[in-house]
Image (spheres, rainbow, N blue to C red):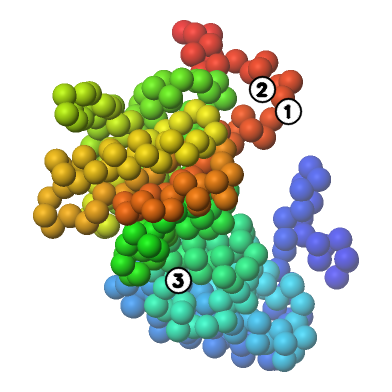
């Protein structure tokens, strides 16, 4: 056969793969493809009954079989195109047997060597989301972490991609805090994983307000995106919540209740770098919430201070001696931060863009 024909049909510079003729394939391949067909046929009933889990396991088995045969027989990549054609012919009513998807099956089995883990964890995730894990993550550790988080939080593939891009794994459990001394060990570990550093407020756009009250307003206007960044379990209670203490009026920035931790979370937002006095203010708000709002069955109120920058050593000394659990983290507008200084000021604001579109 002409080498150009082996490459596939060429139209306007685009090459469409053509499977090798069946007569060119070895007897070993012919036996192998029949075994794969038999495995697919055997799984079809369970695929209908438990579609995603069975399909994922089937894909892993196919991928593993390909790897094994390639190692034993020295098969090259062209076997994938031949398999795609044979499987489509044998199962015309089933999708998922394109050359590209079969290559994903092979990569899937290569990346997840433990079939028990595949059955118990990865098979609970849709195939599209599994492909996202393969495409976006290089290490097994990170794939496992995001797989567990996807199941725990019910993320779609689009949300998973957003969390990977924001480097959620690297940010989780990174706040400077006094949780180990303010909470029992089990609670401390759980609370520490809920909070991160830094928090990313990309959804606010590039025209960042300078006043804290304006930032709070924008966060509540984008409450769905804000809750996504905070993580699962946060329920919004209020903004600028009024507290009367000894006849004096105070207003805490943002108040949440965490459904899993079973406690209130007071968030104080600062548009400047950390100052030790911020801890005292936040601690007082926590004391009032514990006294006035906290139910007897609730756990101690947690305080989260969000600042533009911090010296971790200063924060650690500032937290010493406080009994309330407090975490300190930075917040960033990642989009604006990544741009050169000369471009940040030249970008139009959200309001200017909306005005142009009217």
User: Which residue is located at x 77 percent, y 77 percent?
Assistant: 76
Q: On the picture, is 79 further left or further right than 193?
A: right
Q: Position of residue 307 (x, y in %)?
A: 49, 36
- Residue denoted by label 3: 122
Residue 133, image quadrant: bottom right
Residue 241 visible somewhere in the drawing = yes
Q: Is residue 339 above or below residue 317?
A: above
Q: Earlier in the sequence, mark 3 or mark 1?
A: 3
Q: Which residue is mark 1?
A: 340
The quadrant of the image that shows the N terminus is bottom right
Mark 1 and mark 2 in contact? Answer it, CB < 8 Å: yes
Q: Which residue is drawn at the image coordinates 43% and 53% (left, top)?
A: 320
Question: Between residues 104 and 96, which one lies in front from this camera angle?
Answer: 104
| Nearer to us in this view, 56 or 162 | 162
Residue 324 position, x and y percent, is 31, 51
- Where in the figure is residue 338, as x and y percent of width and height? 67, 35
Quarter of the view holding residue 216? top left
- Alpha-carbon distance for marks 2 and 3? 42 Å
SS at circle 2? helix
Residue assigned mark 2:
344
Whether residue 29 is visible here, answered yes or no, is no
**Residue with the most extreme left position:** 296
Q: Could you tell me which secondary element the residue under label 1 belongs to? A: loop
The 10 Å Cα crowd at callout 1, few under 14, some 14 to 19, many 20 or more, is: few
Position of residue 136 in the picture relative to residue 211 (left or right): right
Q: Residue at horizontal 56%, vertical 86%? A: 34
Comes first in the chain, label 2 or label 3 = 3
Figure label count: 3
Q: Determine the CA span between mark 3 and mark 1.
A: 41 Å
Relative to 36, is 100 above or below?
A: above
Task: Write down the quadrant of residue 188 in the picture.
Answer: bottom left
């Amino acid at each position: 056969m002409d080498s150009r024909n082996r490459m596939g049909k060429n139209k306007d510079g685009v090459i469409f793969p053509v499977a090798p003729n069946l007569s060119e394939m070895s007897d070993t391949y012919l036996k192998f493809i029949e075994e794969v067909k038999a495995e697919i046929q055997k799984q079809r009933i369970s695929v209908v009954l438990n579609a995603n889990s069975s399909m994922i396991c089937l894909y892993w088995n196919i991928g593993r079989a390909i790897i094994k045969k390639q190692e034993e027989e020295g098969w090259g990549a062209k076997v994938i195109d031949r398999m795609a054609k044979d499987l489509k012919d044998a199962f015309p009513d089933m999708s998922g047997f394109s050359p590209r998807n079969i290559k994903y099956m092979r990569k899937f089995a290569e990346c997840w060597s433990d079939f028990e883990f595949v059955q118990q964890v990865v098979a609970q995730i849709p195939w599209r989301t599994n492909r996202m894990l393969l495409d976006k993550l290089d290490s097994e550790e990170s794939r496992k972490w995001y797989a567990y988080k996807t199941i725990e939080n019910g993320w779609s593939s689009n949300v998973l991609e957003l969390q990977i891009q924001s480097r959620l794994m690297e940010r989780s459990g990174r706040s400077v805090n006094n949780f180990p001394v303010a909470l029992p060990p089990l609670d401390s570990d759980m609370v520490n994983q809920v909070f991160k550093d830094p928090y990313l407020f990309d959804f606010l756009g590039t025209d960042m307000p300078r006043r804290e009250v304006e930032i709070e307003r924008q966060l509540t206007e984008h409450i769905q995106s804000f809750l996504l960044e905070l993580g699962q379990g946060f329920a919004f209670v209020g903004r600028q919540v009024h507290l009367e203490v000894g006849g004096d009026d105070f207003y805490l920035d943002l108040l949440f209740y965490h459904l899993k931790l079973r406690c209130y979370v007071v968030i104080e937002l600062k548009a400047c770098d950390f100052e030790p006095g911020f801890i005292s203010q936040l601690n007082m708000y926590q004391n009032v919430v514990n006294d006035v709002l906290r139910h007897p069955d609730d756990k101690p109120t947690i305080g989260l201070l969000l600042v533009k920058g911090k010296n971790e050593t200063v924060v650690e000394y500032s937290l010493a001696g406080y009994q309330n659990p407090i975490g300190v983290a930075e917040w960033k507008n990642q989009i604006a931060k990544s741009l050169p200084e000369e471009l940040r000021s030249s970008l139009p604001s959200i309001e200017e863009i909306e005005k142009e579109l009217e």
